[in-house]
Amino acid sequence: MVGKIFAVVVVLITLATAYCVMAHVWWMPVDISVHGPKIDHQIEETILVAGLLFVAGQLVLASFAFVYGGATSKPKQIPGGAKPLVIFAFVLVGAEILALSFIGSKAWGAVYFEAPDPGSMRIDVQAGQFAYYFRYPGPDGKFGPLHPDLINEGTQNYFGIDTDHDQDAKDDIVTAELAIPVNKPILLTLHSKDVGHSFYVRELRVQQDFVPGLNIPIHFTATQTGRFEIVCTQLCGLGHYNMKAYLSVLSPADFDDWLKKQAAAQ
Amino acid sequence: MQQPSAHAAAHHAPPKGFIRKYIFSVDHKVIGIQYTTLSLVAVFIGMALSWAMRIHLAWPDARIPLLGMLSPSGAPGGLMTPEYYLSLMTMHGTIMAFFVLTAAPMAGYGNFMLPIQVGAADMAFPRLNMASFWVTFVGFVLACATFVIPDGPPLSGWTAYAPLSAVGAVAGPGQGWGQNLWGLSIAVFCVASLLGALNFIVTTLDLRTKGMTLSRLPLSTWGWFINAWVSLLAFAVLLPTCLLLVLDRLGGTSFFIPSGLVINDQLQPHSGGSPLLFQHLFWFFGHPEVYIIILPAFGIVSHILPTFIRKPLVGGWKAVTWAMIAVGTLSFVVWGHHMFVSGMSPLMAMVFSVPTLFITIPSVIAVLIWVFSLYRANIRFDTPMLFSLGFISLFISGGIGGFFLAQPSTDSYLHATSFVVGHFHFTMGLSAIFATLAGFYYWFPKMFGRMMNEQLGKIHFWLSFVLVYCVFMTMHLTGFAGAVRRYSAYVDDFMVPLIPTNRFISVAALLLGAVQFIFLFNVLWSRFKGPKAPDNPWGATTLEWDTTSPPPFDNFGERQITVNHGPMEYDGEVGVMQTSPQPSVAGT
């Protein structure tokens, strides 16, 4: 009786879980990046492979508990001992793993191994407790150098740029919102001024940590206009839960207007 | 098999006086109970912390008066601040991972059972063993002390990523002395674990009684033995890591802090360090650590199953043992999967992905052996068996999540979401706890000489099993929606719609915690009022069941133990003791 109850409970849990995943009760938002479909495909693929193992594993466990509870006949082993199980694990799981590794490495490679488009728009990102700031190079197309000793929240010098002495820094545009033109390759360089942070935009399928002391490049192309949240996913202190900024994907014309307004406000 | 001299070395005179008997005891059984009791206290503290967090997440305006009394600054009027949430989270992880999951199944049961299971009178180094426990105790006191110092506990998570953990109080409340105490506490815990691991290894190798060949070791002993090696190598790295962290904080060094950091508009006086170095060192320990938690669970469940299915495991002792050895070995080459999005080279991400996926194979082999051993068995559903079955189900579910997190491409979306929280709670958290509870119900009669209440045990199991799934499977699902972990409040536009689900998780978690009081009541009631336990209540075959309940101080009295059989001599109702001269029934 106990075995049968166990079996029923396990089956119910398995079915409920499978339903929630298949019916996308909680699910990823629509992807807005060029590379995203590869990641989504890989997640779907993994759901298939891992889901099969999950359902099969739980159902076999449940059925054995159901059938062999309290049996009084002489117990017997499966024929062949452990060998078929070991071979099964190596062949089936091994094949699934190899398949995932090869397909998965393509998806990963598409994000991280392809060099950014040489015509990418470059934007600097500075993360600090508990805000993001973004820097556009201005008309000269060059970023002024960074001087950590000049960073000062009070004077709103979030990056530590020296507009008095650095020619390249004079036209740099610093904003609190990340606006980008749609369908334009973007190359971000991530800096952190204090501790670890992260850049996570679910719709872009991008998550990348900021590491103090390193300049970390990431590149992507957004395919849809809209306003999306950039949130911090690396524990950075008491305001971690509230560290966010917005990503605005704009039409090229809207973007140019936006950037002009930002430049005028500097 | 063994040299008489080595065996004799473990003998000691019966202890005299309360202090030598129960406090500073060198008896491995007392030390095992001390560790188990410490873990029991720790697990209820850890659980209380998770209650406070779950209440705050579901009802951010709720006041928890007790918390206000504990920390007037962290929870003024009982209302939790965001930083105090992170402090509670940090200490929940720290206490659970180190003082519960690492301590109970290995140091607790292993200390009590391993010497008996190999037929020894005690551990190889009884005084070192006593030192291990008391050093662990000091570590625990240091960890708990963070709650009473003015700054409160650290808030950098149990992973204590630098530079947040390294720069000092400037990085936030709790990052002053709270983080110092944390670093010292874990360093001290490492020392205790290293001493314990040495004792386990030497005892298993040198103190086995006559006839106790390696092939006749119970699988629980194999689990502890393999785990001792993993612990020895992993804690040997965490110890210097903690010391370097403390040096960065107090000694003015810059191992983990790069130059040019500006915190609160102050340029930090450090240069040349690497935050990624800390992550590499931490996870070089941290990933083996999750196997340090799960390998004793593998051993315990493999030890318990044959008793309740009345036949040996498929493949005898070899298959599971080799699976455990493979898992333990591979555990040292997978750490980078915690760092796919950390800024580590993307090429290294692929290098770490492959062994991470491959470690699935020995894990799947172990699961297949447990599951297919049930085939044509005579299953007895006593509470230890139910928790073992629960362990298998949870471990399957947890393992499945691993496929998503082992691949850099899928991890880049799911990393740092509640999917990860659900995953590690299923695997190193609740699977390990279920195996630990299975071991508790199984060995309680031996440890205390009394039976636990079976009905309460079953109620404990059913409610826990269903509620664990409600809490942690739901976390997997919200992870797909991108619910970010380690947030003290859900304020982002996309997080707000998840609040009702989050409340459901909180309610289930609070109930899950409440159910554990049934267990606590059962433990305390049975300890003093439970029916007297026979020597071998489950009809088992290994040496711990071949002596009185509880065993005498030297485990077997004057008896000379000679082992003639493997540990799984079951054939239906028949179970042949390892010491029995009668012929084998199962060929183990």
Image: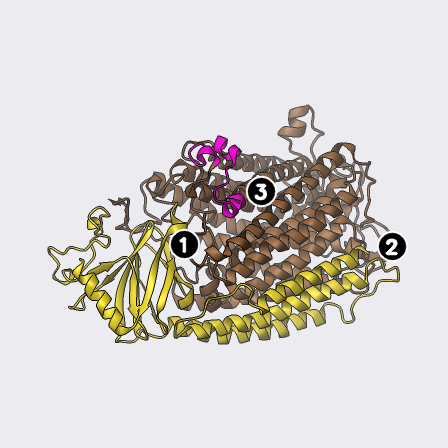
Chain colours: A yellow, B brown
Q: Residues within 10 Å of mark 1 (few under 14, many from 20)?
A: many
The kind of residue tagged 2 is Val
Identify the chain of the residue marked 3, using the numbered disc in the image.
Answer: B
Q: Is residue B295 left or right of residue A177?
A: right
Q: CA distance from mark 1 to mark 2?
A: 56 Å
Give me the C-alpha separation between circle 3 and circle 2: 41 Å
User: Which residue is at a point 69% across and 25% down the rendered structure image?
Assistant: B16
Foreground label between 3 and 2: 3
Give the numbered dot on residue B47.
Answer: 3
Q: Which of these two is toward me, A132 or A26?
A: A26
* Local SS, label 1: loop
The answer to whether residue B435 of the structure is visible from this angle is no
Q: Which residue is mark 1?
A: A234
Q: Give how far across and how far down residue B207 sits, in percent.
A: 69, 45
- In the rendered view of the protein, which quadrant contains the N terminus of chain A? bottom right
Labels 3, 2: one chain = yes
Rounded to the nearest whole Å, what is the CA distance between mark 3 and mark 1?
24 Å
Res. B305 in view = yes
Check residue B65 for magenta coloring: yes
Q: Nearer the viewer, residue B178 or A11?
A: A11
Vertical side of B473 occupied by A57: above or below: below
Q: Secondary structure at mark 2?
A: strand
Part of the protein shown in magenta: B53-78
| Front residue (pair B485, B583) | B485
Instruction: Report whether A22 appears left or right of B380.
Output: left
